[in-house]
Amino acid sequence: MRIFIITMDDPLITNKFIRKILKIRKSEIIGLAKAKGNRLKTFKKSKLEYLFCLFWILGPFIFIKNAIISLIFKIELFLLKQFNSYPSNSILYYCRLKTISSYEVSDVNSSSFLSILKDLNPDIIINQSQQILGKEIISIPKHGIINRHNSLLPKHRGRITPFWVLLNEDKETGVSIHYVNEGLDEGEILYQFSYLINGKNFNQIVETNYRIAPLAMLKALENIEKNKSYKAPIRKASNYNSTPLFEDLVRFLKIKYG
């Protein structure tokens, strides 16, 4: 199967997940595109308010640690680009190391990038970018585009899902691999891995999700190859959550600290 990957260059968690997919399915990877965008995109909401909420959701230590790692990464990326190189924790560095064709893309829906994809003729695209994919790019791969989502869809579509899982006081959560369509996290589910929360905090849920995400993605790819359908457990609740705001944080802290 000819696999193409679209992702952001995230040194904190996403790159580790993508590296595992690249390592295990390397012979089938025909290319990777690093798309513009990052986790701090707020879709026209206040970035300052979002950062304030993240400070308390992650906790001061993890927030500061992540901020330092991200800042160092950006500085290294800027400096090394002058020498046509990348930081060692960049997904583009890994692609170059493993001789995987890579691209840097500002807009994944641009005609120039669509032309590249059509020439490559992928069977499937794995998407982990922060950009909304248009109808034309979705139609290119033979088996469609698939995405990893940190909740048990259709519950908690949208962003920063472990936060909403805890705010909703759910008993279980997990990872969903689903087809991408023009809706937001609404495509057919290919595979789900669920587990009981059992007192896990936000950071522990994120860590668990990214530990099981490669297994879920590989299982979904296997299901596609074998034309095997997957029946997700029936979950009647379907909701969409966006970037947390101050009032959401207040409710979250009340639950967290009683």
Image (spheres, rainbow, N blue to C red):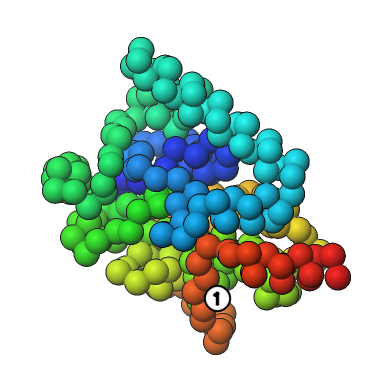
Determine whether 1 is above or below 78 in the image: below
Q: Is residue 81 visible?
A: yes
Drawn side of residue 19 relative to residue 27, left or right = right
Residue at the image point whose x is 50% and y is 67% from the top: 242
- Tell me where residue 113 appears, x and y as whole percent: 19, 44
Image quadrant assignment for residue 233: bottom right
Seen as rendered, the residue at the extreme top is: 83
- Tell me where residue 199 appears, x and y as whole percent: 81, 64
Q: Nearer the viewer, residue 46 or 89?
A: 46
Determine whether 114 is above or below 75 in the image: below
Q: Nearer the viewer, residue 247 or 232?
A: 247
Image quadrant assignment for residue 36: top left
Give the quarter of the figure containing the C terminus: bottom right
Seen as rendered, the residue at the extreme bottom is: 236
Tell how many labels: 1
Residue at the image point whose x is 74% and y is 45% from the top: 60
Residue at the image point whose x is 44% and y is 24% from the top: 77
Seen as rendered, the residue at the extreme right is: 258
Q: Nearer the viewer, residue 38 or 217?
A: 38
The residue singled out by tag 1 in the image is 155
Amino acid at pointer 1: Lys
- Tell me where residue 68 appears, x and y as whole percent: 62, 31
Determine whether 216 is above or below 9 in the image: below
Drawn side of residue 151 relative to residue 90, left or right = right
